[in-house]
Amino acid sequence: MARRPSKNLTERELAIMQIIWDLLEARLGDVQTALNQAGEPVAASTVATQLTILLHKGYLKQTGRHGRYVYVPTCTREEATRNLLHEFLERVGLGRAPRFLIGLLKREKLNAEDRAALRAILRDEPPAKGRREDETP
């Protein structure tokens, strides 16, 4: 029985998505150049294969003609992160994201800016820029 394809991103796929999110759209050559500048050389055929995988996983859409394809993300960085977290929590049986995040936050030392951002989330409003922790809205 064949293994079901994973929607999770590998390290290299995530690196490619980061490049495309930053550029908003990219050609194969753009991605290859960015990957080569960031680390070890990668062949165009390898990048093409990984772009095809990202198409099949639903993270990218392809426009243009053969040999001049332009790749555009189908979701934002934040949406992808949220979906990957949700899938992870389901796979490992940790339940809802808030419970998991509360557990993580209990292990962290939060600075004033972090606490202010969390308070804003709990009030369901965007965090104010430059607000000190001891200020009240």
Image (cartoon, grey):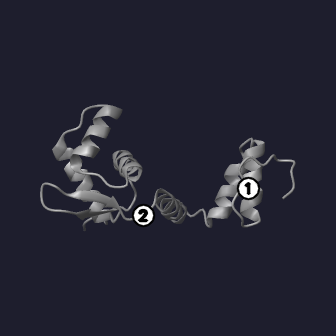
Could you say where residue 40 lies in the image, as x and y percent from the top left? 29, 31
Name the image quarter holding the N terminus. Answer: bottom left
* Dot 1 and dot 2 residues touching (CB under 8 Å): no
Could you say where residue 6 lies in the image, as x and y percent from the top left? 35, 61
Q: Is residue 37 above or below residue 13?
A: above
Can residue 91 be seen in this snapshot?
Answer: no
Q: Secondary structure at mark 2?
A: loop
Q: Which residue is mark 1?
A: 118
Could you say where residue 77 lies in the image, as x and y percent from the top left? 47, 56
Could you say where residue 123 lies in the image, as x and y percent from the top left? 77, 65
Q: Residue at x 77, y 50 (%)?
A: 115
Name the image quarter holding the C terminus. Answer: bottom right
Q: Residue at x 56, y 64 (%)?
A: 93
Q: Residue at x 24, y 51 (%)?
A: 27
Q: Is residue 19 left or right of residue 1?
A: right
Could you give the CA–CA distance between mark 1 and mark 2, rounded to whole angstroms?
Answer: 25 Å
What's under tag 1, amino acid-wise?
Leu
Q: Which residue is mark 2?
A: 75
Q: Which mark is residue 87?
A: none
Looking at the image, how many numbered discs can be counted on the residues?
A: 2
Q: Is residue 74 left or right of residue 103?
A: left
Q: Residue furthest left?
A: 66
Q: Is residue 64 left or right of residue 6?
A: left
Q: Secondary structure at mark 1?
A: helix
What's under tag 2, amino acid-wise?
Cys
Q: Residue at x 37, y 47 (%)?
A: 19
The 10 Å Cα crowd at callout 2, few under 14, some 14 to 19, many 20 or more, is: some
Q: Nearer the viewer, residue 7 or 78?
A: 78
Instruction: Say whether disc 1 or disc 2 marks the residue closer to the N-terminus.
Output: 2
